[in-house]
Amino acid sequence: MFNSNGLEYSNGITLYNSFLHLFFPYRCLDCKIELLPNEPGICVFCQAGIEVVHLPIEPPPHLTVDDVEIYAFFYYKKQGVSQSLLHALKYIQRRSLCVYWGRSFARQLSPNIIGSLECLIPVPLHRKKKLIRGYNQSELIAKGILTEFPHVHLNTSCIKRVKHTKSQTKKKRNDRLSDSSEVFDLLPFDIGSYKHVGIVDDVITTGATLMGIISLIRARVPHIRITIFVLAVTK
Ligand SMILES: [Zn+2]
């Protein structure tokens, strides 16, 4: 499933990147073998270890809202290839890979799923964290998805993360839940002008973060249709 996508990735990289690759070859994010230019961060052998999700998925235990569909690309496994990939997207500046895997995800989605979707809202990072990281991985994943669905637009101006939290992965579950409802705020943008929005994140674990955002949106627009797109879901 990755071969054709991989070739397109190869066509997209610049001559400059090819030059760099010659002297500083990228290595597989998992097994560290040297990659071919058309391999998207993960070698073809490790790609076989990524288990693709059959869509859609059941809501995780703490995402307790009605009428929300959730689509995920692959399963997240600790110590697995998926963990190496997600870590790279978030922490080691692999921006082009965020877009690439977002696009690959979009190719698994039926046009019927996207049909009435008007915009994608990436889960925002706090301003300070974005400044430190230099990018929001969820925003780049959303951009990758939108390359396949150009009629949908990206909206990064309706929700803001208002509290700087430690990495969710380092916190206890109870801490994550108590934080979820207070870390986001709606900006003055009129979200009521939408009938169907998508929310994009890199991974869904308990669902607490997404619950915080959905509760906020539904408090303002009770009947809005919401679809969630995440690259990975815990099994
Ligand atoms: Zn590998």
Image (cartoon, helix red, strand yellow):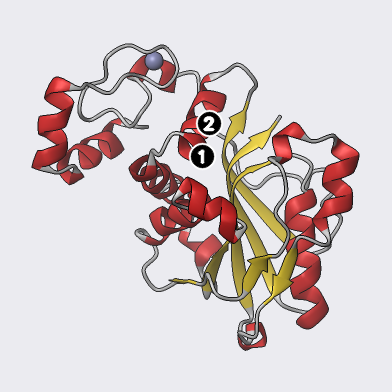
Residue at the image position 42 percent from the left and 44 percent from the top: 98
- Relative depth, front residue between 54 and 129: 129
**Quarter of the image that includes the C terminus:** top right
Residue 5 figure quarter? top left
Mark 2 highlights which residue? 87
The answer to whether residue 15 is above or below residue 26 is below
Name the one closer to the observer, 127 or 30. Answer: 127
Q: Report helix, strand or loop for mark 2.
A: helix
Where does residue 72 sit, x and y in percent of width and height? 59, 44
**Residue type, mark 1 in image:** Lys
Left or right: residue 165 versus residue 76 is right
Mark 1 element type:
helix
> Mark 2 Cα within 10 Å, few/some/many (few <14, many 20+)?
some
**Residue 212 visible somewhere in the drawing:** yes
- Does the residue tagged 1 have its C-beta within 8 Å of any atom of ligand 1? no
Residue 136 seen:
no
- All told, the count of numbered labels is 2
Q: Position of residue 68 (x, y in %)?
A: 74, 61
Q: Which residue is mark 1?
A: 90
Residue at image x 50%, y 48%?
Answer: 132
Q: Quadrant of the N terminus?
A: top left
Taking the image in four quarters, ligand 1 sits in the one at: top left
Q: Are marks 2 and 1 in contact (CB under 8 Å)?
A: yes
Q: Amino acid at mark 2?
A: His
**Residue 217 vs residue 76: left or right?**
right
Classify 103 as above or below 50.
below
